[in-house]
Image (cartoon, helix red, strand yellow):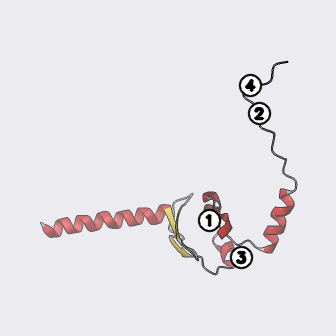
Amino acid sequence: MRRLIAMLIGIAIGGGLVFASFNFHLVRTDKSWLLVRKKQADWHDAYVDIRGWSSREWGEHKALSDNLVAMGRGDLVQRSLADKLFRGFLDSFREAPAPPRHANPPAP
C-alpha cells in the first residue's frame, strides 16, 4: 500500500511540474527569480537564465521577451539598437493622452 501511495504522490508532483512548465517561465535574473506566465502554452523556455544575455539572444527568445514586457518587467529585456531607434521613431507619432473627463461637468 505504501508503494501505491508513493507512486500516486509522484504522479501528482510530476503532473504539477509538467503543467507549470507548460504555462510559466522560470526566469533567473541578476538579482532574483521570476515566475512569468506564458501567453501560449508550450515547452519552450520553461527555465531561462537571462544573466548576461545580448540583444541577439533576446531576438531568439521573442515569446519570452513579449511575456516579460506583458508582465511589466520590460526593463530586463535588452533591445537591439535598430529596435530602439525604430520604437523611438514610432513613439514620436503617438497621440498625446486625452485629458481626464470629469464625472460631473460644470453647470453653465
* Residue drawn at 46 percent across, 66 percent down: 21
Q: Residues within 10 Å of mark 1 (few under 14, many from 20)?
A: some
Q: Given the image, on which type of amino acid does mark 3 rest?
A: Ser
In this picture, residue 15 sits left or right of residue 24: left
Residue 29 placed where, x, y %?
A: 57, 74
* Residue drawn at 76 percent across, 73 percent down: 80
Q: Quadrant of residue 14?
A: bottom left
In this picture, residue 101 sits left or right of residue 21: right
Residue 31 placed where, x, y %?
A: 56, 75
Q: Given the image, on which type of amino acid does mark 4 rest?
A: Asn
Residue 47 placed where, x, y %?
A: 50, 73
Which SS class for mark 2? loop
Q: Which mark is residue 55?
A: 3
| Residue at the farthest top position | 108
Which residue position is annotated with label 2? 101
* Residue drawn at 27 percent across, 68 percent down: 10
Q: Residues within 10 Å of mark 2 (few under 14, many from 20)?
A: few
Q: Given the image, on which type of amino acid does mark 2 rest?
A: Arg
Q: Given the image, on which type of amino acid does mark 1 rest?
A: Ala
